[in-house]
Image: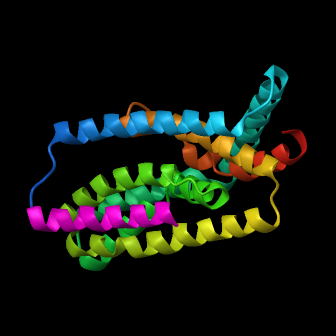
């Protein structure tokens, strides 16, 4: 729960700071934050891959193929379910809501944006399976800046959005921890961590705003890779 608590605290602090300071963040400052977060994402992604893969050359090749197969199959499932389209609709709704900021509206939109992102799922799963809070700490840095900007537009409603983040990510982490303790073997955990590392690494493109990788459609790869890793890792 450490990463979730950091994330929730960042959202609360960012929104409160916006209400107290009453000034916008400069574009140059936001860009510097983006670069720092991108470097952190690259480091965390590489670290997760390094930590979860092991053995000799053949073992690493087999594990890489498992990751690729999991990503391809997971993407096919995500496309069929329309996961990224659903997430995009949330972003579109947030853009429309900026034209009519209200207390309740600000809470609903900011809560959806903070909860319904690929990193929210990835981070909570990682913390539950391995106890590592780095992915959620990365998300917290982005959410803090986002909460500041959202609070400037929506006002006090954004301050309450830490509550659903705490509930969603915390419960997901606890569920994964329970599964890890009772059902999952180390191969499954390593497989899920490895594919998560790959997805975190790819998120650099999204963080820097130089592309729009459809990470939402790849979320089923967590489960698919876990199943494949059980037999092939």
Q: Could one spot residue 111 in this view of the protein? A: yes
123 with respect to 91 (left or right): right
Quarter-of-image position of residue 183: bottom right
Q: Residue at x 70, y 48 (%)?
A: 192
- Residue 152 image position (x, y, % from top left): 18, 62
Could you say where residue 136 lies in the image, as x and y percent from the top left? 48, 55
- How is colour applied across the structure in the image? rainbow
Q: Residue at x 67, y 50 (%)?
A: 78
Between 80 and 226, the residue placed more toward the observer is 226
Q: Position of residue 202 (x, y in %)?
A: 53, 35
Is residue 213 in view from this perspective? Answer: no
Is 210 magenta? The answer is no
Q: Give the residue furthest to the top.
A: 57
| Residue at (80% x, 20% y) in the render | 57
What residue lies at 32% left-to-right and 39% top-to-bottom? Answer: 34
Q: Position of residue 108 (x, y in %)?
A: 38, 73
Which quadrant: the C terminus? top right
Viewer-closest of 57 and 101: 57
Instruction: Out of 77 and 183, give the one closest to the viewer.
Output: 183
Q: Main secondary structure of the magenta part?
A: helix
Q: Is residue 5 above or below residue 33?
A: below
Q: Quadrant of residue 28?
A: top left
Q: Residue furthest bottom?
A: 104
Q: Which residues are magenta?
A: 1-21
Q: Quadrant of residue 204?
A: top left
User: Residue most toward the left?
Assistant: 22
Front residue of this view, candidates 25 and 7: 7
Q: Is residue 196 left or right of residue 55?
A: left
């Amino acid at each position: 729960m450490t990463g979730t608590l950091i994330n929730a605290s960042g959202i609360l602090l960012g929104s409160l700071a916006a209400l107290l300071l009453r000034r916008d963040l400069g574009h140059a400052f936001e860009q510097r934050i983006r670069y720092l977060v991108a470097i952190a994402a690259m480091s965390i992604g590489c670290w997760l891959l390094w930590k979860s893969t092991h053995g000799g050359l053949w073992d690493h090749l087999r594990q890489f193929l498992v990751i690729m197969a999991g990503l391809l199959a997971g993407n096919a499932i995500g496309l069929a379910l329309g996961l990224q389209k659903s997430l995009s609709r949330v972003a579109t709704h947030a853009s429309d809501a900026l034209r009519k900021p209200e207390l309740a509206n600000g809470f609903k939109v900011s809560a959806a944006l903070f909860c319904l992102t690929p990193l929210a799922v990835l981070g909570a799963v990682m913390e539950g399976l391995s106890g590592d809070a780095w992915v959620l700490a990365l998300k917290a840095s982005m959410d803090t800046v986002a909460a500041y900007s959202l609070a400037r537009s929506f006002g006090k409603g954004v301050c309450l959005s830490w509550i659903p983040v705490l509930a969603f990510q915390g419960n997901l982490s606890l569920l994964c921890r329970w599964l890890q303790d009772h059902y999952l073997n180390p191969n499954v955990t390593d497989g899920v961590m490895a594919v998560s590392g790959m997805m975190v690494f790819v998120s650099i493109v999204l963080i820097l705003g130089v592309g729009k990788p459809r990470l939402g459609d790849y979320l089923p790869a967590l489960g698919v890779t876990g199943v494949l890793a059980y037999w092939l890792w």
